[in-house]
Amino acid sequence: MNKTTPVLVTGGSGFLAGHCILALLEAGHEVRTTLRSPEREAALRAELAVAGANPEGRLQVCTADLTADAGWAGAVAGCGLVLHVASPLSSAAPKHEDELIGPAREGTLRVLRAAHAAGVGRVVLTSSFAAIGYGRILERPFSEGDWTDASAPGLAAYPQSKTLAERAAWDFIDGEGRGLELAVINPVGIFGPLLGPDMSASILLIKAMLEGRLPALPRLMFGVVDVRDVADLHLRAMTDPAAANERFIATAGDFMTMQEIAQVLRDRLGPAAGKVSTRVLPDWLVRLVAVFSAAARQAATPELGRSKTASSAKARAMLGWEPRPAVDALAATGDSLIRLGLVGRSG
């Protein structure tokens, strides 16, 4: 593809989006990104510069919000490809599921409609493993042919939002969006080095462990993948003809328990991880806490004690993707939190 034709990355101040911008700039692409507020542009440029990128002259910034139409036509105008990375996600449990579901679904459709109208060739959508592996139990690894049961009792708002938003995207491509190619990336928990102080839910988990705010851990397990590898997979899905109208799970390997993640931090970070606990909470106590805590109910109880994993064989075989080991992603997370002085600070 012509690298002078801009690639749009939505939500440029986000953890993954920042790494996608960095990877695109390093690959020689012209990049355009959206921010909800123009006041965040200076911080974004500074973070990219610290990471070694030279965004001057090759990065345009537009103002657009997933909850409104304003700005999207201009953001996609002249772009050949779009990485739709932005998604509403709060670190706290929403008071009502529609706080996430509506903006996620409508925001995705808003970007797809604008891209289709502008003649964009392909959109790479950042979905989530949350759209694949929740609300049901399988005896085998989850794959791209699986979908979360969005109607499952007790399902948290986040997996509902990611499932319904991705379903809406595929319905759009099958209907009014015909002619627009879609590729979907479904990452598990994204870890790795931060570019700045903005933290995803996965990063906040590691921060809480390092600060000793999790004296014992629930019996939960999830996948781990490095943010740099997820960005790399986006770029591969953006250009490879084989990726058109396909889903790709992004995971570095077998899922890990929270206790295993804690042990990696202790082994790899040494004294800096001295406050990390590897004690495990009994299930009955987690369920008791969930009676009084909406956040605990949303985060823990439906998945408590469940063993699951997923396969990234498709991305490896079709796109030649080779992620780094999960232990390296976790160690890089802790290293960057410490280096940026974020351990011990509110976030």
Image (cartoon, rainbow, N blue to C red):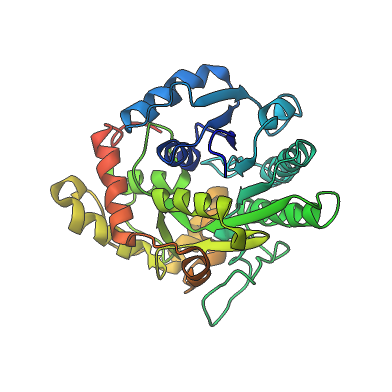
Residue 55, quarter of the rendered image? top left
* 296 versus 219 height, above or below: above
In the rendered image, residue 104, in percent from the top left (x then y), is placed at 68, 44
Farthest front residue? 2
The quadrant of the image that shows the N terminus is top right
The one of 80 and 101 positioned closer to us in this rendering: 80
* Lateral position of residue 24 relative to residue 35, left or right: left
Horizontal arrangement in the rendering, residue 259 relative to residue 152 (left or right):
left
User: Is residue 94 in view from this perspective?
Assistant: no
Q: Position of residue 315 (x, y in %)?
A: 51, 65
Please indicate whether residue 235 sits to the left or right of residue 347 in the image.
Answer: right
Give the residue displayed 67% in from the left and 57% down from the top.
163
Instruction: Place residue 113 in its image quadrant.
Output: top right
Q: Does residue 77 lie above or below 260 as drawn? A: above
| Viewer-closest of 167 and 280 | 167
Q: How many marks?
A: 0
Q: Residue at x 65, y 47 (%)?
A: 123
Q: Residue furthest right?
A: 176
Q: Quadrant of the C terminus?
A: top left
In this orientation, does residue 33 appear? yes
Q: Work out which residue is located at the far left of the displayed protein and give it.
A: 271
Percent across and percent down for residue 191 are 39, 50
Residue 310 image point, x, y percent = 50, 70
Q: Is residue 242 left or right of residue 103?
A: left
